[in-house]
Amino acid sequence: MIYCILDIDELNDLRYGQVIQDSADTVRKNLAADKFIISFPADAVPAIADSKTKYTHSEMLAYQADPANGWSLPPNPDLK
C-alpha cells in the first residue's frame, strides 16, 4: 500500500474507485483539516497522485506521529 497527502481542495476531484477510501468521509484529515491522506496499491497509482510525494506505510505512520507535521498533538506531559 502506498500513501499520499493531498490538499483539501482536491477532495472533490478524487475518484474513489481508484483509492482505498470510499468517500470524503473516510479520508484521514490533518488537525487543520486542510490536507488529507489517500492510499492505493503500489501498482495502481491514481492520476491525482502522480506528482505527489509517495509514502510507505511505515513512512506515513512516522510522518503522522510527528506533531510538527500537523497530524497529531504533542504529548501532554501531565498525562502519565
Image (cartoon, rainbow, N blue to C red):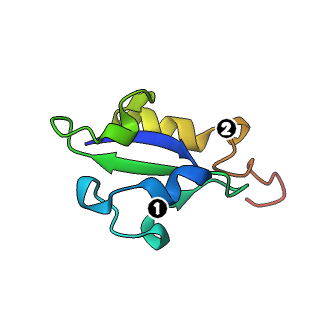
Q: Where is residue 66 drawn, in percent x and y? A: 64, 38
**What amino acid type should be assigned to the residue bearing mark 2?**
Asn
Contact, mark 2 vs mark 1 (Cβ under 8 Å): no
**Direction from residue 57 to residue 43 in the image, left or right:** left
- Residue at the far right: name it: 78
Q: Label for residue 27?
A: 1
| Viewer-nearest residue: 54 or 71 | 54
| Viewer-nearest residue: 78 or 57 | 57
Which residue sits at x=72%, y=36%? 68
Sort mark 1 into few (<14), some (14-19) or many (20+) by Cα contacts within 10 Å.
some
Badge 1 element: loop
Which residue sits at x=67%, y=58%? 33
Badge 2 element: helix
| Viewer-nearest residue: 65 or 51 | 51
Q: Where is residue 52 drawn, in percent x and y? A: 45, 30
Which badge, 2 or 1, is on the more N-terminal residue? Answer: 1
Q: Which residue is mark 2?
A: 69
Q: Where is residue 71 drawn, in percent x and y? A: 63, 49
Looking at the rendered image, the quarter that the N terminus falls into is top left
